[in-house]
Image: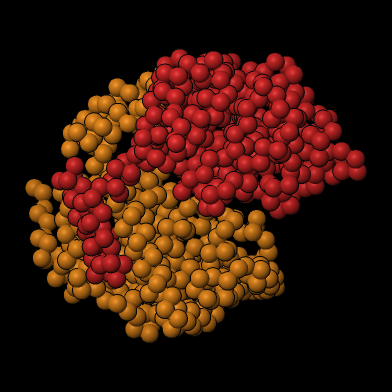
Chain colours: A orange, B red
Amino acid sequence: MRRTLPDIDTFVRGIRSADRALLGQAITLVESTREERQVMAREIISQLHTNLPNNTFRIAVTGAPGVGKSTFIEALGMHLVEQGKRVAVLAIDPSSAMSGGSILGDKTRMERLSATELAFIRPSPSGDSLGGVARKTREAMVLVEAAGFDTVIVETVGVGQSEIAAQRMTDLFLLLLLPGAGDELQGIKRGIVEMADLLVVNKSDGDRIKLANQARAHYLNATHLLPLKSSGWSPEVLSCSALENIGVAEVWDRIEAFKKHIQTNGWMTENRRQQARFWLEDTIDAGLKDLFYHHPEVKARLEALEPEVLSGRVSAIDAAIQVLAAFRKGL
Amino acid sequence: MRRTLPDIDTFVRGIRSADRALLGQAITLVESTREERQVMAREIISQLHTNLPNNTFRIAVTGAPGVGKSTFIEALGMHLVEQGKRVAVLAIDPSSAMSGGSILGDKTRMERLSATELAFIRPSPSGDSLGGVARKTREAMVLVEAAGFDTVIVETVGVGQSEIAAQRMTDLFLLLLLPGAGDELQGIKRGIVEMADLLVVNKSDGDRIKLANQARAHYLNATHLLPLKSSGWSPEVLSCSALENIGVAEVWDRIEAFKKHIQTNGWMTENRRQQARFWLEDTIDAGLKDLFYHHPEVKARLEALEPEVLSGRVSAIDAAIQVLAAFRKGL
């Protein structure tokens, strides 16, 4: 027998009182591909949105595979939890769009953090496009914030387009680096360094301290060459050892300094407004395409016209106009 | 008094008989933002599409500013014209989307090529987005091919997203490089080298020959590390001096070898099919957004809802659904 789902009211009240099971189930609704579940998810988000906490802070954490993201997030998360903060960890993993399985999915990576009631860890949703994956993460963020998690960490793998999506839903962009110098070594894409508000050289311990200092000097130099950011913040380069819990408190101090900076000069509000506009347009675009490509007239016209376009007998613009006309008439 | 435009039939017959003035005017229609001119342009393209020459070859030429693209294209173009080929040069310049003025617009850059009846040179269209600029270039390509230009060169500046658009409308991707080694020096974005079928070190003359050989060795090494392309072609690295017309004939020989390779193994047909599918979807997307955002109900709902979304009172998904519903009902 299929279990019946709780009703929307139960979800909304449950999430507001930080019921972890209902929170998890609601995120599963967000991630569902079934229409009726998506409708439910939207209604839950809509109701929660009328009264969201406004004291949250959102941090993107990225870096190449092997840089120690999980260890770092666990160390930072534990530091926050010890101060009474409530921490949610979400992920955007573009490989989950390809494979359906997420490399950021392994909860056991963050054993201590997973064990505390003050933290909530959710692997990356899967989806048929990075856009879809990112939209789901953004919607899950509304749910965890409504459940009272005041610090949200969005983890990405640092090798694709997912950093841009993560940046578009967070207040601070933190790039983890390895000891040693040079972008090539770091395996990060050009442009990522420019996005960072804080650069943190991890694994700065034992006989790697010298290399870590090299990396720090290299990136300090690199960030000095960058144009001033809209936030007015000059990127800082720190080092730490998440494994040995050295320097993690200092990283948090600088995160708080950044937060104070953007709260004081108004950038936090302005940035969140720009982000909201982006997600509005992004969600509209996705919905519009959905409406269009699921339309029976469109499907029929496209099926007939596509071979003609592919073979070059009909122009793309001609076919597009015919399909759009079918859509318009058939609505 | 406003000049009346020729009728569609005049355009179609004129272009088919290679009337340069009518060809130029038709491209201006394609580039026009006025609805009735666009409708005319589409009708012309649609009629020409029923009987397009199928022996054309399309070459993307890119490289950083200063690499000598104009000089190279002129030298290559003159070489082709001397063999009786008819050469059209189009451009995709992303800066024309920003500034409205094209840095690839200066016809006088290619004086000799401009002077011959066998060549046709058109600066980059302007537009409010790279997508718009690229679509116009792609439509202009239909027109020049209908007018009998058998070799189309699409020029881009090599520093933005325009290379991807150029690759999506051409058969061969040629990257021009400077003497000396290192991507940093070349000022090209990561990922561009991977796209190239032919890499050509230009300005290989005088005391730069040693540096040119260094660059050749460097890129030869780099291309050997790349995964095999779908075309089955291994990228080649050549050198030339467009200014002194040394090595240009050899570049053309390798272009012909590439052409033969992809004609024989079927990639040329398959690639053009994939490109046609891309442009179909791209044109539909643009038309769909146009339909949506110009819809009066949508405009009114968006105007009312946007401030609510930006301030965080209404969720993006909620607003998107409301606006999409207004669109659906109002059509």
Q: How many marks?
A: 0
Q: Would you say residue B141 is visible in this rendering?
A: no
- Spot occupied by residue B48 in the image (x, y as percentages of width and height): 45, 19
- Which quadrant is the N terminus of chain B positioned in? top left
Q: Nearer the viewer, residue B96 or B252?
A: B96
Residue drawn 60% across and 34% down? B122
Residue B102 in view in this figure: yes
Establish if A2 lies above or below A243. above
Q: Position of residue B183 (x, y in %)?
A: 70, 49
- Taking A126 as reference, is A62 above or below it? below
Of the 4 image quadrants, the one containing the C terminus of chain B is top left
Q: Nearer the viewer, residue A251 or B268?
A: B268
Q: Is residue B165 left or right of residue A206?
A: left
- Residue B255 falls in image quadrant: top right
Q: Is residue B134 left or right of residue A45?
A: right
Residue B309 is situated, as x and y percent measured from the top left of the image, at 28, 65
Q: Residue furthest front?
A: B1
Residue at x-position 73% and y-position 16%: B83
Q: Is residue A176 left or right of residue A215?
A: left
Q: Residue at x 43, y 48 (%)?
A: A95
Q: Is residue B314 above or below residue A105?
A: below
Q: At which x and y percent is residue A175?
A: 53, 66
**Front residue of this view, candidates A181 and B240:** B240
